[in-house]
């Protein structure tokens, strides 16, 4: 993300822009997002937004890449327990559905094929090394580490805001989420078990 302003007033405006833009892009995508709605919701003006972020595309990039950093840092991989990682991803999608929606808009509007981001090594390298090490030690099944990681992530998204079957919300009863977590945990364990 661009460097945040040093004054408390500037930092507050910057944060309001980030929050308003996150909601706007998550709901409408890149093409559908409107700077006018973002600045109105952030209680600022276009000059301030452009001063911090440049333009609408750069604002989306700042929001999107910050969301990738967030999920990598908040839900770090544990290759020795990929089932738990999948459940923690499920929980993160419940608490921050905007993160997965931003990634979906990036897929739809920016990179319809291949890796989601051009600099994918930056986000995947540590995860892939962890998977490869667990494979080498015989703790999880063999196969391309990237494909194994992608499959676990896809399983964690079964009830996410972009599911083509059912999108879960945090407001559903706890026992419903507990049942999904148990199913997800068991399914991932079976899928990645050594052969």
Image (spheres, grey):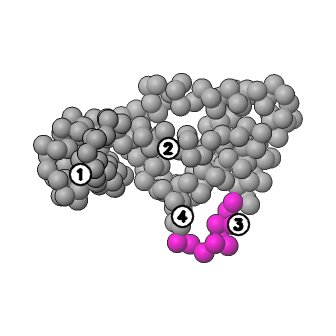
Query: 8 and 116: which one is in front?
Result: 8
* Circle 3 SS class: helix
Query: 70 and 61: which one is in front?
Result: 70
Give the Cα separation between the discs numbered 3 and 4: 12 Å
For marks 3 and 1 on the same chain, the one whose residue lies earlier in the sequence:
1
Residue with the mark numbered 2: 70
Main SS of the magenta segment? Answer: helix
Q: Is residue 108 among the parts visible in the rendering?
A: no
Q: Residue at x 36, y 36 (%)?
A: 1
* Circle 1 SS class: helix
Q: Residue at x 64, y 52 (%)?
A: 88
Residue with the mark numbered 4: 168
Q: Which residues are magenta?
A: 171-181
Q: Residue at x 76, y 27 (%)?
A: 133
Task: Check contact, mark 4 vs mark 2: CB within 8 A.
Answer: no
Instruction: Relative to 158, say whether 49 is above or below.
Output: above
Query: 189 and 81: which one is in front?
Result: 81
Residue 32 placement (x, y as % from top left):
25, 49
| Number of residues whose C-alpha sits closer than 10 Å to that of mark 1, classed few (under 14), some (14–19) or many (20 or more) | few
Give the Cα separation between the discs numbered 4 and 1: 37 Å
From the viewer's perspective, tell me whether residue 22 is left or right of residue 113. left
Give the Cα separation between the discs numbered 1 and 2: 24 Å
């Amino acid at each position: 993300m661009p460097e945040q302003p040093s004054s408390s007033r500037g930092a507050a405006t910057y944060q309001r822009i980030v929050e308003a833009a996150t909601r706007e892009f998550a709901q409408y995508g890149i093409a559908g997002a409107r700077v006018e709605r973002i600045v109105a919701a952030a209680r600022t003006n276009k000059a301030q937004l452009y001063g911090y972020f440049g333009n609408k595309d750069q604002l989306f990039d700042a929001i999107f890449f910050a969301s990738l950093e967030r999920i990598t840092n908040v839900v770090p991989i544990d290759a020795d327990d990929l089932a738990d990682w999948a459940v923690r991803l499920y929980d993160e999608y419940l608490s921050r559905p905007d993160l997965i929606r931003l990634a979906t808009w990036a897929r739809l509007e920016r990179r319809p094929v291949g890796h989601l981001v051009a600099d994918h090594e930056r986000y995947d390298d540590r995860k892939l090394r962890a998977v490869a090490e667990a494979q080498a030690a015989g703790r999880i099944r063999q196969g391309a580490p990237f494909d194994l990681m992608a499959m676990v992530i896809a399983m964690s998204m079964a009830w996410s805001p972009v599911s083509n079957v059912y999108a879960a919300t945090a407001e559903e009863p706890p026992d419903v989420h507990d049942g999904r977590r148990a199913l997800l945990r068991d399914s991932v364990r079976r899928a990645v078990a050594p052969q």
